[in-house]
Amino acid sequence: AMAVLASVAHADAQQIATTVCLACHGPGGNSVVPAFPSLAGQQVAYLSKQLNEFMSGKRTNEAMAPALADLKPGDVPGLAAYFAAQKPAPGRVQDAALAKRGEEFYNDGNVDSGVPACIGCHQPAGAGNARFPRLAGQQQAYILQQLANFKSEARTNDKARVMRVVADRMTEDEMKAAAEYLASL
């Protein structure tokens, strides 16, 4: 009986993903729109948390509001599992030299300004874990917008206090370099 329920939930999740989510998050959760995140390969726990926070209003986004209008809390586990199981598309580098600087910053941070190494939370090669999101392959514009949202306090969910401090200490060049590195993965 549980296997039947799981397959029904997966079918429902795939239906929602390929209709409601597709326009912004792309086929299989690989976004082709620079401002929208790729969801493919993201951790189940992180996806579930974000969806629940969008639904409760704890996290807001104008594009997500209409998309979530018909979503039910029971849809969240299946959607999170569906996107987590999708294969992430390879990243796209626009500036190899900038990506190289970004890799150094990601791995070491900036001791002088007190920016910790991104790798400490987001893991080697941006893989993430259950508590911190996968950043590998996210498009530059999305990463830059999220850093700006943390810096301006427009984004208050997640590890907002920590990320607010980190983003506030990052220079624009460091943000662009980190975003380029992450997009390259």
Image: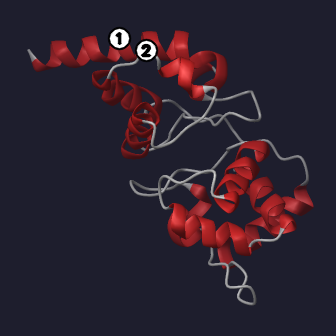
In terms of secondary structure, where does tag 2 sit? helix
Where residue 56 sits, quadrant-wise, is top left
In this picture, is 30 found above or below 131? above
Where residue 171 sits, quadrant-wise, is bottom right
Find out whether the residues at labels 2 and 1 contact each other: C-beta distance under 8 Å.
Answer: yes
Task: State the image coordinates of residue 145 (x, y, percent, origin top left).
Answer: 73, 48
Task: State the image coordinates of residue 37 (x, y, percent, origin top left).
Answer: 64, 37
In terms of secondary structure, where does tag 1 sit? helix
Q: Amino acid at mark 2?
A: Gln
In this picture, is 39 found above or below 134? above
Q: CA distance from mark 2 to mark 1?
A: 5 Å
Where residue 24 sits, quadrant-wise, is top right
Which residue is depicted at the point 36% across and 45% down? 45
Specify whether 139 is left or right of 24: right
Which residue is depicted at the point 40% across and 32% down? 80
Mark 1 = which residue? 11
Determine the residue located farthest toward the left in the rendered image.
1
Q: Residues within 10 Å of mark 2 (few under 14, many from 20)?
A: some
Image quadrant where one finds the N terminus? top left
In this picture, is 125 found above or below 183? below
In this picture, is 132 found above or below 79? below
Task: State the image coordinates of residue 35 (x, y, percent, origin top left).
Answer: 74, 35
Which residue is depicted at the point 63% across and 29% down? 62
Along the line of sight, which residue is nearer the eye, 40 or 25?
A: 25
How many numbered markers are drawn? 2
Which label is found at residue 23? none
Task: State the image coordinates of residue 158 (x, y, percent, origin top left).
Answer: 47, 55
Specify whether 117 is left or right of 113: left
Which residue is depicted at the point 49% across and 42% down? 42
Mark 2 = which residue? 14
Q: Amino acid at mark 1?
A: Ala
